[in-house]
């Protein structure tokens, strides 16, 4: 999903992290969920300080993902929604 140039730029940014970050996705069976999962997996593979997991037990809009400290469920959540054609 991410091209080589984007991975290089993102890796350089992630090297500056001083604390671990967890990406928590709440997904469904949609194509958009598959894209989000692929993207977050690729991001997590770029740094030892970034982990990715799915948690479909959360009562939130799907698909969405949260950027948080490990073990927390607080932080910015990004949701996909249809804005029309």
Image: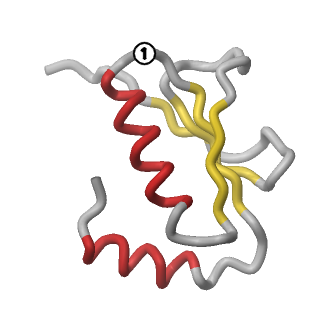
Left or right relative to 5: residue 40: right
* Residue under the point 53% across and 31% down: 64
Place of residue 66 in the rendered image (x, y in percent of width and height, measured from the top left): 63, 42
Q: Residue reaching furthest right?
A: 71
Place of residue 34 in the rendered image (x, y in percent of width and height, measured from the top left): 38, 31
Place of residue 75 in the rendered image (x, y in percent of width and height, measured from the top left): 72, 46
* Residue under the point 31% across and 20% down: 82
* Residue under the point 52% across and 24% down: 27
Q: Which residue is mark 1?
A: 29
Q: Is residue 55 above or below residue 21?
A: above
Q: Which quadrant of the view contains residue 9?
A: bottom left
* Residue under the point 52% across and 63% down: 45
Q: Residue reaching furthest left?
A: 85
| Quarter that holds the C terminus | top left
Q: Which quadrant of the view contains residue 56?
A: top right
Q: Tell me the crowding category of disc 1: few under 14, some 14 to 19, or many 20 or more residues within 10 angstroms, Cα based.
A: few
Q: Is residue 2 above or below residue 68?
A: below
Q: Which quadrant of the view contains residue 15?
A: bottom right
Place of residue 52 in the rendered image (x, y in percent of width and height, measured from the top left): 62, 48
Left or right relative to 22: residue 62: left
Rendering colour mode: secondary structure
> Depth check: 7 or 74 in front?
7
> Depth check: 76 or 33 in front?
33
Number of on-image labels: 1
For mark 1, give the secondary structure. Answer: loop
């Amino acid at each position: 999903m991410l091209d080589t140039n984007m991975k290089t730029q993102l890796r350089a940014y992630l090297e500056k992290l001083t604390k671990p970050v967890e990406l928590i996705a709440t997904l469904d069976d949609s194509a958009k969920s598959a894209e989000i999962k692929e993207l977050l997996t690729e991001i997590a593979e770029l740094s030892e300080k970034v982990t990715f997991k799915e948690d479909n037990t959360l009562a939130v809009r799907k698909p969405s993902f949260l950027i948080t400290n490990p073990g927390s469920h607080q932080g910015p959540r990004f949701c996909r929604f249809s804005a029309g054609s």
